[in-house]
Amino acid sequence: MCTAITLKTQDGLHALGRNLDIVALLDVAVILIPRSYAFTHTIMSLKKKNKYAMVGMSTTFENHVLLVDGMNEKGLACAVLELPKYASWSKALDKDKINVAPYDFVYWILANFQSLEEVKDGLKNVNLVNEPLEGKEVSVDVHWIVTDRTGQSIVIEKTKGNFRIYNNKVGVLTNAPTFDWHLINLNRYMNIQVTNPHKVKWGHQELSFDSEGFGGIGLPGDVSSSSRFVKAAFLRNHIRVEKGEDALITSTFHILSNVAVIKGTAVTCHQQYLKTQCTSCMCLETGVYYYNTYNNNQINAIHLFDENLDASEVKVFPYQDKLVVQKQN
């Protein structure tokens, strides 16, 4: 489970933000991957240097980088989210295409493309093949959201018999069912509004509200995928985002906090507690990666352009999960 959104300020700054919702804590950290880093592509066992430097949240297995989200130096950003029961991959290599494992897909996109248009063109020549990582439990029932500095975004899904690229006009992605189902489901919530309804009479009895917010009655409050999609789309559509990077960051975190999962409020059939492990926000113009965690609400920032982008090794930034309190006396 996860939620991702795009957002734009009044002066044209763009963000991709996401909640990472899991049951078993991932050993993650923000990493900076320079242009000269030689990445080993799992399927073909080939090492290849990146076209573009990138920064993102990652876990690793025997030094193999597994990005869950990130952005590159050109302002292209991508996040992977679960799509259980629907995702389906090729079972064989295609010698006429670029063969990529689903868990390497975020890396492949950020390393090779600088815009949505380039991504769309590149997807014509890709074959997504499931290749298990020995000794590592990696979810491959996934789909992706990709965005750039234009503010537009796409959703990429590979299901049985279909490889679909959707133009994402609502700027939101959650989990199953597929993206097209979520768009149809939004139509059920057209009545929800930010203003209170007008007073009415039922018979001779006048009905009126006794507080603000009655227009939002019916907005989902549970943490199912479909409900998070609706709520995130509603909040994203109505939030007032002022000018500047501060407004972009605070607005993104406010929306995502409203669809975050609190430990104990969602329990799986295996008695596992689901929770939002961390929330991230990437400013595509400034190259700053922001995140906070379940245990540490303080926002941490890693500046892509403050690092040596021509280095040859990955730089790991320690995951700040311990509560930080700013004492005022």
Image (cartoon, helix red, strand yellow):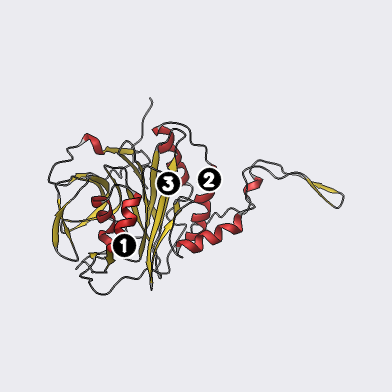
* Residue farthest toward the top in the current orientation of the protein: 329
Q: Earlier in the sequence, mark 2 or mark 3?
A: 3
Q: CA distance from mark 3 to mark 1?
A: 24 Å
Q: Residues within 10 Å of mark 3 (few under 14, many from 20)?
A: many
Name which quarter of the figure residue 175 lies in: bottom left
Q: The disc labelled 3 sits on which kind of residue?
A: Thr
Disc 1 crowd, CA 10 A, few/some/many (<14, 14-19, 20+): few
Q: Residue at x 39, y 51 (%)?
A: 19
Q: To which quarter of the image does residue 221 belong?
A: bottom right
Considering depth in this image, is 123 or 222 the residue closer to the camera? 123
Tell me how far mark 2 sits from mark 1, CA to CA.
32 Å
* Distance Cα–Cα, label 2 vs label 3: 11 Å
How packed mark 2 is, by other alpha carbons closer than 10 Å (few <14, some 14-19, many 20 or more), is few
- Please state which of residues 101 and 57 is positioned toward the viewer in this rendering: 101
SS at badge 2: helix
Which residue is farthest right? Answer: 204
Q: Depth check: give the residue in front, 92 or 235.
A: 92
The residue drawn where x is 43% and y is 49% is: 5
Q: Label 1 sits on what residue type? A: Lys
For marks 3 and 1 on the same chain, the one whose residue lies earlier in the sequence = 3
Figure quadrant of the C terminus: top left
Contact check, label 3 and label 1, Cβ < 8 Å: no
Whole-percent x and y of residue 306?
A: 22, 34
Residue at image mark 3: 6
| Numbered disc in front, either 3 or 1 | 1
**Exactly how many numbered labels are in the figure?**
3
Give, as a three-letter code, the residue at label 2.
Answer: Asn
Q: For the residue labelled by badge 1, is the local secondary structure a helix, a strand or a loop?
A: helix
Residue annotated with mark 2? 237
| Residue linked to disc 1 | 124
